[in-house]
Image (tube, rainbow, N blue to C red):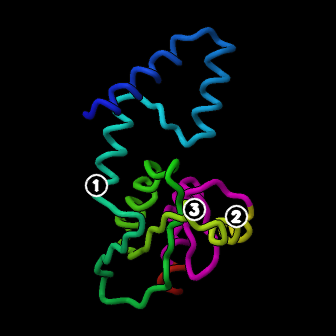
Amino acid sequence: MSLLDRVRARAFAAIERAPTRVRDLAQKANDALGRPLADEDELAERRAFATGRGNATIVAQPTPAKREQAPVLVYFMDKQRRDVTKLTDILDSHGIAYTATNIQEDPAAQAAVRRDSHGIRLPVVFVAGDCIGGRTELLNAASSGDLEKKVFGA
C-alpha cells in the first residue's frame, strides 16, 4: 500500500471516529468527491481493479453454441468502479459478452445514460439500447430468465 493510500485510510478512520454531526458532514463531502477517503480494503480493491481493467474493457466470453447476442453495455463512473464487478460477475455467469465503459470524462454520455436509464443509479446495464437497470434489476432479470431472452432472443 502506498503512502498516499495509508494517509487516505487514516483520514477515513478519523472521519469514522468524529462526532456524529461532523462525521455525517464529512461523509457527505467524501461521497460527493467520489470517495477519495476510504478504508484500506476498499483502496486495495480499487487499486487492483484499476490495474486489472482500464477505463473501457471488452470482455469476450464465448457464448454457448455460438448463439447470436444483442450488444450489452455496462456504464459506470470512477466512484462506482468497485460496483461494476458485481454486475459483470452476473453477466459472466450467464455467458454474456459485454462492454464496460467509464463515462467519467464524457458529459454527453453521462447525460444520455441518465436520460435513457430514467434516473437509475450507476453502474447500469443496457441490452440492445434498452436499460435493464442496476444490480438488483439485473439479478431479477437473470433469475427470471428475462435476461437471456433479451440478450439471446426468444
Q: Is mark 2 on a helix, strand or loop?
A: helix
At 64% from the left edge and 54% from the top edge, which residue is drawn?
121
**Residue 71 horizontal side relative to residue 64, left or right:** right
Q: Is 131 inside the magenta-drawn segment? A: yes
Q: In this view, does 27 lie above or below 123?
A: above
Which image quadrant: the N terminus?
A: top left
Q: Residue furthest top?
A: 19
Q: Mark 3 and 2 residues: CB-CB less than 8 Å, in contact?
A: no
Task: Give the labeled residue for mark 3.
Answer: 124
Q: Give the range drawn in magenta.
A: 119-148
The picture quadrant where one finds residue 126 is: bottom right
| Relative image position of residue 80 (x, y in whole percent) | 51, 50
Give the class, few, some or many, for how many residues have Cα within 10 Å of label 2's Cα (few <14, many ≥20). Answer: some
Foreground: disc 1 or disc 2: 1
- The amino acid at mark 2 is Arg
**Residue 77 horizontal side relative to residue 53, left or right:** right
Q: Is mark 1 on a helix, strand or loop?
A: helix
Residue 51, label in figure: 1
| Relative image position of residue 104 (x, y in whole percent) | 55, 60
**Disc on the earlier residue, 3 or 2:** 2
At 40% from the left edge and 55% from the top edge, which residue is drawn?
85
At 45% from the left edge and 56% from the top edge, which residue is drawn?
84
